Image (cartoon, helix red, strand yellow):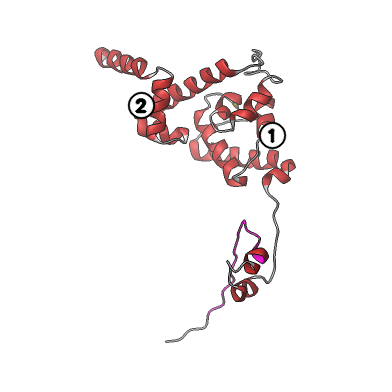
Amino acid sequence: EPRRVSVNVIAATNRDLRAEVAAGRFRSDLYYRLNVVEVKLPALRERREDIPYLTAAFVREANERLQKAIIGLTPGAEGLLATAPWEGNVRELRNVLERASILTDGDFITERELASSLPHASYMAHASLERFDGDEPVPAAGAGRLVDVEREHIQRALVRAGGNKKAAAKMLGVSRRALYRRLERLELSATITRRRDAAALMV
């Protein structure tokens, strides 16, 4: 039995559809059918003034989901977010903050929690100007310290995951194979095995 329906279609794209139509990669009839009201939203890197407001909203979401009470970000962490390229736009910002919220044990998200998610270039540029954890200055070179940060993140994720490398890799946003490579490079495999053996002996 035929039924009448009223449908409003909301479509989104990161392409220039006019150019796609001209190039023959998008149907012109579909374009003109969809293009009743067009709203252009600039990329996040083009509206950086929105980052603090989005950050506050995403941290609140993470607090509710993770049952945490994170107050906010340290000034250094805010600086990292302000200078990141954000190729993945708002979705990338949300994922970075969710991962940082999982990793943090304190009241504030710091550079430590963001270092594994943001490009090293952004972190390194900021490291020479900001204090690493609010107290201790970061060496201008920063390379050795960045390795320490990565090691700490991986160890913390493994502890949270109860030693389950698949779960830890998911927390860190990397594949399990990539995590194994990092464990070997940072010489963490033997340390983790010894800790597990010691824990077994104490049971």
SS at circle 2: loop
Span of residues in magenta: 5-18
Q: Position of residue 158 (x, y in %)?
A: 40, 25
Q: Residue at x 74, y 41 (%)?
A: 49
Q: Are marks 1 and 2 in contact (CB under 8 Å)?
A: no
Type of the residue with mark 2:
Gly
Q: State the predominant SS element of the stretch in magenta.
A: loop
- For disc 1, the marked residue is 83
- For disc 2, the marked residue is 162
Q: Position of residue 68 (x, y in %)?
A: 52, 32
Up the image or down, 36 lies above or below 46; here it is: below
Q: Position of residue 134 (x, y in %)?
A: 66, 17
Q: Residue at x 70, y 51 (%)?
A: 42
Type of the residue with mark 1:
Thr
Question: What separation in Å lies between label 1 and label 2 (alpha carbons)?
Answer: 34 Å
Up the image or down, 167 lies above or below 92; here it is: above
Frontmost residue, 33 versus 182: 182
Q: For the N terminus, which image quadrant?
A: bottom left
Frontmost residue, 146 versus 193: 146
Q: Position of residue 103 (x, y in %)?
A: 50, 28
> What label does residue 91 carry, if any?
none
Q: How many marks?
A: 2
